[in-house]
Amino acid sequence: MAEPKQFGFTHQELAEMMVKRLDLKEGLWAIYLKFGIGGANIASDANTAFPAAIVPVLEIGLQRIEEPSPLSVDAAEMAPFRKARSTKASRKSRAN
């Protein structure tokens, strides 16, 4: 079987990963993207050029929000998963 070369995630999955990575235990969190804007002339051949906008993603982050949305995760609902996993890991370490 070929190895995967690309993985995609939903906004909510990214928010869950960031909440876990930051070990947040409460609050509603959603990802945000910070965009820049630039311009350039883009040539399709030697005789034509068109002005174009370039919109780079400058930053991807996590922000606390007040109301739940389809893009948000509740850190408090994720906390039991982390506790169960850490308890299981500590049992393994005690067994060794």
Image: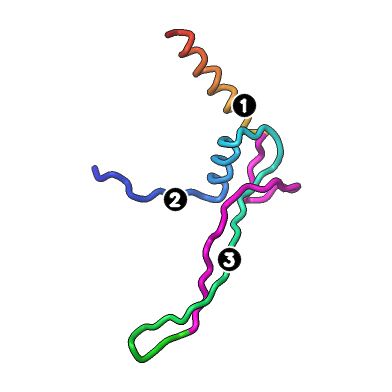
Q: On the image, numbered disc 3 is attached to which residue? A: 36
Q: Which quadrant of the figure contains the C terminus?
A: top left
Instruction: Tell me, for residue 12, which label it has, or none.
Output: none
Label 3: how many Cα within 10 Å (few below 14, some 14–19, many 20+): few
Colour treatment of the image: rainbow
Could you tell me how far apart the alpha carbons at marks 1 and 2 are, in whole angstroms? Answer: 26 Å
- Secondary structure state at the residue bearing disc 2: loop
> Hey, what amino acid is under mark 3?
Gly
In terms of secondary structure, what is the magenta stretch mainly? Answer: strand
Q: Earlier in the sequence, mark 2 or mark 3?
A: 2
> Which class describes the residues within 10 Å of circle 2: few (<14), some (14-19), or many (20+)?
few
Q: Which mark is residue 80?
A: 1
How far apart in space, not on screen, are marks 2 and 3 (Cα)? Answer: 23 Å
What kind of residue is marked 2?
Gly
Q: Which residues are magenta?
A: 51-75
Say which of 91 and 51 sits in front. Answer: 51
Mark nearer the viewer, 2 or 3:
3
